[in-house]
Amino acid sequence: MHSSAVLLIEFGSIILGLGLLGRFAGRFGLSPIPLYLLAGLAFGEGGLLPLGASEEFVATGAEIGVILLLLMLGLEYTAGDLVTNLKSHYPAGVVDCAFNALPGAVAALLMGWGPVAAVVLAGVTWISSSGVIAKVLGDLGRVGNRETPVILSVLVLEDLAMAVYLPIVTALVAGAGLMTGSITLAVALGAAGLVLFVAVRYGRLISRFVSSDDPEKLLLVVLGLTILVAGVAQQLQVSAAVGAFLVGIALSGEVAEGAHTLLSPLRDLFAAVFFVFFGLHTDPASIPPVLLPALALAVVTALTKIATGYWAARRAGISVKGRWRAGGALVARGEFSIVIAGLAVTAGIEPSLGPLATAYVLILVIVGPLTARYTESVASRLSRRRSDPDRRPDAPENVPQAAEAGASADA
């Protein structure tokens, strides 16, 4: 059979399969990311049906997926929003980094993986999944709750931190020396600062230049500009993802809203391809040996994320129930964790890092929506039992309803 025909058959089968998996996950209110990762494991080396002709094409699609994921995150915030959040909520960002990056770094060092792998795994355990969390908040009807701005502030600060962190990781995994790494970081920081300055001072002019009443022209200009900037950033030894994120920040107003609407289907398509591609490079047989460390790390960092959200919400004056809801909502890890681990896997830093990250994300992307839904009610139940130790274990309780009432009161 002609190679192009094989490519079309394989890639078409992947896309069809991803669509069916996404529909299946949506029927049960779950994130499709775990199923996409499992699909990648099935199609990769050691899987049920390894790919041949389409792997290189999938790799290109995966790179576009990362670029679009970061662009869409940047479109969520204006430069002014970022500056405001950085000034008012930076203590929460510091606590978030300390509580959640440290366990990953310590785990990597305890397993003897070395300092570079420690920096990578610290990022994997640090960053929450903005996409999964946003979907869960919408599904639970909590977008208008008082604790939601706190959750979003933590996510914004994590996104900002990525503009600094990703270039550092890129330099480390590439084996760059101190001088080269310092130049890379300086270029990244300079680019980030320049884009933020231009976006704050001249954001309207940029948006007016990109703006178009024709959706086709707007799509082509925004997508072309993003991929161009991402390519230039990568050529300068700065992560392409950082370049895409900065483009998203620079756009605002109606242009950002229009681009978000037009690019959402493309992001969903290529992001799904990216998760599959990550799974392709992970041998399923390599996951069982790291399953226990991944599970232990997931338990520890789920608790540290809950503590982070609780502390940040308390600092903002949110009620106790809202604090627990904020903590539970931040548990999910997803796209950023896989992006970070993917950099190390591609560079061949540590063979077990990819399987560990895959298992870790699989666990927390499933557990995250559950902690968002039930952390507050479980905390309320435990609090009641502590306050009334003589209460019979079989006494009737109406905790879920009470939790829902509390959620409505804090909305």
Image: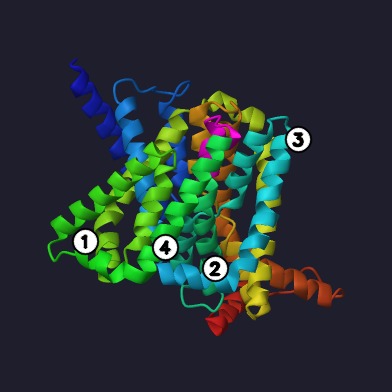
Residue 181 vs residue 67: left or right?
A: right
N-terminal of the pair, mark 3 or mark 4, is 3
Residue under the point 79% across and 72% down: 385
Residue under the point 39% across and 43% down: 240
Q: Mark 4: few, some, or many residues within 10 Å (few <14, many ≥20)? A: many
Residue type beneath disc 4? Leu
N-terminal of the pair, mark 4 or mark 1, is 4
Q: Say what secondary structure mark 1 lies in.
A: helix
165 or 11, nearer to the observer: 165
Residue 39 vs residue 167: left or right?
A: left
Q: Split into 4 quadrants, where in the image is the N terminus?
A: top left
Assign the magenta stretch its main secondary structure: helix
Residue type beneath disc 2? Leu
Q: Say what secondary structure mark 3 lies in.
A: helix
The image's mark for residue 110 is 3
Give the residue number, with chain letter if any, for mark 4. Answer: 196
Give the residue number, with chain letter if any, for mark 2. Answer: 86
Residue 327 appearing in the image: no
How far is mark 2 from mark 1, CA to CA? 27 Å
N-terminal of the pair, mark 1 or mark 3, is 3
Give the residue number, with chain letter if any, for mark 1. Answer: 210
Question: Splitting the image into 4 quarters, where does residue 5 fall?
Answer: top left
* Image x and y of residue 348, in percent: 54, 26
Question: Splitting the image into 4 quarters, where does residue 94 fall?
Answer: bottom right
Q: Nearer the viewer, mark 3 or mark 4?
A: 4
How far is mark 3 from mark 2, CA to CA? 33 Å
